[in-house]
Image: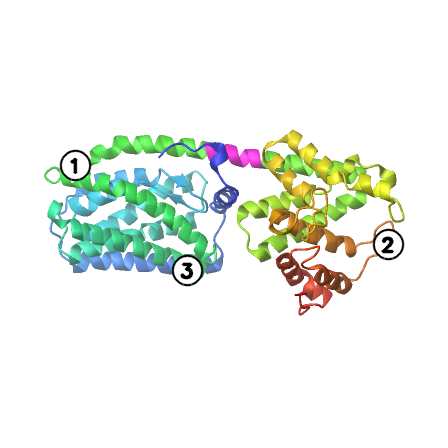
Amino acid sequence: MSAIAPNTIDATTARRVEQAIAGGRERMDKRQQWVEALFALLSIVTATALALLTDADRAFSLPLAAAFVVCYAGMAGVEFNVGAGYVVPTQLIFIPMLLLLPTPLVPLLVIIGALLARIPSVLRGEAVAERLVLAINDAAFAFAPAAVLVALGAQLPDWASWPAYAAAVAAQFATDALRETARAALTRIMPPRVMLSEIYEACRLDALLIPIGLLAALAAADAPAAALLVLPLVALLARFARERDAGIAQTLELGRAYRGTALLLCDLLEDDDEYTGHHTQDVVELSVKVADQLGVDEQVRSQTEMGALLHDIGKIHIPDAIINKPGPLDDEEWAVMKTHTVEGQKMLDRVGGLLGTVGLVVRASHERYDGGGYPDGLAGEAIPFEARIIAACDAYNAMTTTRPYREASDPATAAAELVRCAGTQFDPKVVEALLAEVGPLAGTDALPLAA
């Protein structure tokens, strides 16, 4: 595991991290409160039932249990952000707890440790108190492996019990996936597929740390407190976590700076040409909705939004006499107008970084699906997907707003024109998604796409 460089955080992770940071300070909605309370109650009941109804193969020691719980709380505070959630290196201490403490009691002890880890953030005002219930649910992973070890008679550290240990790990991973996916689906805080990606990251870290925790437990079979010697490794992981957080924070700040630059450029465009500025904002809104309709990933969505925001930025270099001409452009004027995508890319290339990448989208925003566009004559899949979305949304907005040389078309007429040009000027998939957004307004929900 290593520190993360700023440029290794993708747009999806960056957006989820920002949402998670903001969400920690917000109260849960009623639906999430009820779902999380129900899961927490089930977690406490099952952990208590295991503790009361099954026999332990090792005697209980309060000082030893307290030491392990405190160490667990410390490890649970070492968080590696993976998007909407985080992963923690608690397997280093959880595995020794399973084998060196009375196994039936371990799920309850893990719940206590998880709560101790969360309380400081509540006291600092970084999270609302009601979110402590999430700590109980995050600790629910401990029940399945403890139950398996009890059922298979493998509560003590012994190399010969490795099949039972493997079964316990498998049970943990499987129940984690089912439980967390169910929580995501019932609370509706994120799509289940997103939750599965978070679970994968957690399982990947656990798989790396479980062997170390097992070795610590086996080595400390006769002196359980010796398992706490893994603590220096936790200090190293805590340093990596801090470096990762610093990298994420730097990436988020850089993203905000790029967006601020884009908005400033858009303001300059609006000052230069008020119509183009308002048109741009409308295209941005529609393009993002169409991108969501298409189910694109966060990287494409972000590039679509930024590309739509800046797709006309090159018009700053076009003379006002051409921009505002109250009639059709002649060939010479049209040749000048078509340079605005190239000029836009040049401007963004000078900024560099993220906006340099967006420049490629801006350059291609007036290409046609059949290859008859400008400036490069790209066709089909060769045109960046973001540019294909922007092209259709730009055309629809242009058709439905009044320009210096013509009156606006009604939404139904504009939608019919999109259908007519699907497969020639526009990507048919994009047109279909666009119609899903504007169809109710245009009264054209059932317009068939041309074959």
Q: Residue 336's x, y, as percent?
A: 81, 39
**Earlier residue among tags 3 and 2:** 3
Badge 1 local density, few (<14 within 10 Å), some, or many (20+)? some
Quadrant holding the N terminus = top left
Badge 2 local density, few (<14 within 10 Å), some, or many (20+)? few
Front-most of residues 102 and 195: 195
Q: Residue 359's x, y, as percent?
A: 65, 38
From the image, tell me which residue sits under label 1.
Answer: 225
**Earlier residue among tags 1 and 3:** 3
Q: Is residue 399 left or right of residue 237?
A: right
Look at the image and tell me whether residue 342 can be seen.
yes
Three-letter code, disc 1: Ala
* Mark 2 residue element: loop
Residue interval drawn in magenta? 247-255
* Mark 1 residue element: helix
Query: Image quadrant of residue 323?
Result: top right
Distance from the alpha carbon under mark 1 to that under mark 3: 38 Å
Look at the image and tell me whether residue 220 can be seen.
no
Task: Give the number of the disc on residue 35.
Answer: 3
